Image (spheres, helix red, strand yellow):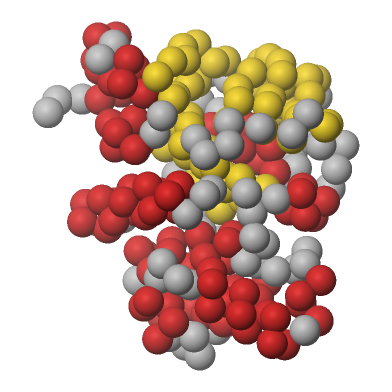
Amino acid sequence: MLELHGISAGYGRNAVLRECSLKVQPGEVVALIGANGAGKSTLVNTVSGLLPCRGGSILLDGERIDGLSPRGRVRRGIAHVPEGRQIFGGLSVKDNLILGAYASEEMRDAAALQERIAKSCHFFPTLQDRMGEAAGNLSGGQQQMLAIARGLMGRPRYLLLDEPSLGLAPLLVSEIFRLVTQLRHAGLSILLSEQNARQSLKVSDRAYVIEMGCIVLQGSSQEILATEEIAEKYLGGG
Ligand code: ATP
């Protein structure tokens, strides 16, 4: 289980997260929903180690990991698929994938690496067909798929998906959410940070609502979908 206990974090003098607690149990999809600037990315970055905790603790299977480097956390089984994909457009699809295995021993074994690439692309046939192409030539949706496949290269147990649907056309947005369900069926536990509250609540078991750096509500996703206040604030019409 991945647990955050009273996490605080920020940038310079700007305190963003205030004592946030959250957990992701094995096999769960947990949504983190909140408006633009609420602190979702800050929380995800704190879990992956890109941003240090200023207070609180992060535990993985009961052991503290908040002192580990990002690489150390990847090795423990946590993959971060960052907001905005962060694909290297000038590198090939394959090289982008290889970068995702940077924390693994298999990096040095060509056959093992090839097998890892094939497994990571299992859900993404388009990528398999375009291995040699520059990643910058892929569409936004394909780049998001590549970012996720790159995350899978570390053979994670926990996947942190930060705004995977951002900037994608509606059809692709649905595809990304379908993929979340497929990944969960493949055995991954997922923390899904999203502004798209309605769809993320539909594919998740539980959810946390973050406002101005604080977790203000948590519960089963069904309950939260049915909460009037949430509907008004985050779900819009329809
Ligand atoms: P978004 O969907 O816009 O990414 P978010 O919920 O992920 O929203 P964060 O990106 O975590 O929100 O931002 C939370 C707060 O932290 C905002 O006030 C933002 O301006 C601030 N912030 C984010 N990144 C930095 C940074 N690198 N330096 C300083 N302040 C930052």
Give residue 59's position: percent from left, percent from top. 76, 30
Which quarter shows the N terminus? top right
Give residue 137's position: percent from left, percent from top. 41, 80
Q: Quick check: 31 left or right of 159?
A: left
**Above or below: residue 118 compared with residue 145:** below
Q: Residue at x 80, y 20 (%)?
A: 55
Q: Residue at x 50, y 60 (%)?
A: 148
Return the residue found at the far left: 238
Choose between 232 and 202: the one closer to the eye.
Answer: 202
Quarter assignment of residue 232: top left
Does residue 192 appear in this view? Answer: yes
Return the residue found at the far bottom: 132
Q: Residue at x 43, y 61 (%)?
A: 144
Return the residue found at the far right: 67
Q: Quick check: 101 left or right of 30?
A: right
Q: Residue at x 87, y 37 (%)?
A: 67
Choose between 62 and 82: the one closer to the eye.
Answer: 62
Quarter assignment of residue 154: bottom right
Quarter assignment of residue 129: bottom left
Give residue 176's position: percent from left, percent from top. 34, 53
Does residue 53 appear in this view? Answer: no
Give residue 71's position: percent from left, percent from top. 79, 55
Which quarter shows the C terminus? top left
**Above or below: residue 81 compared with residue 103:** above
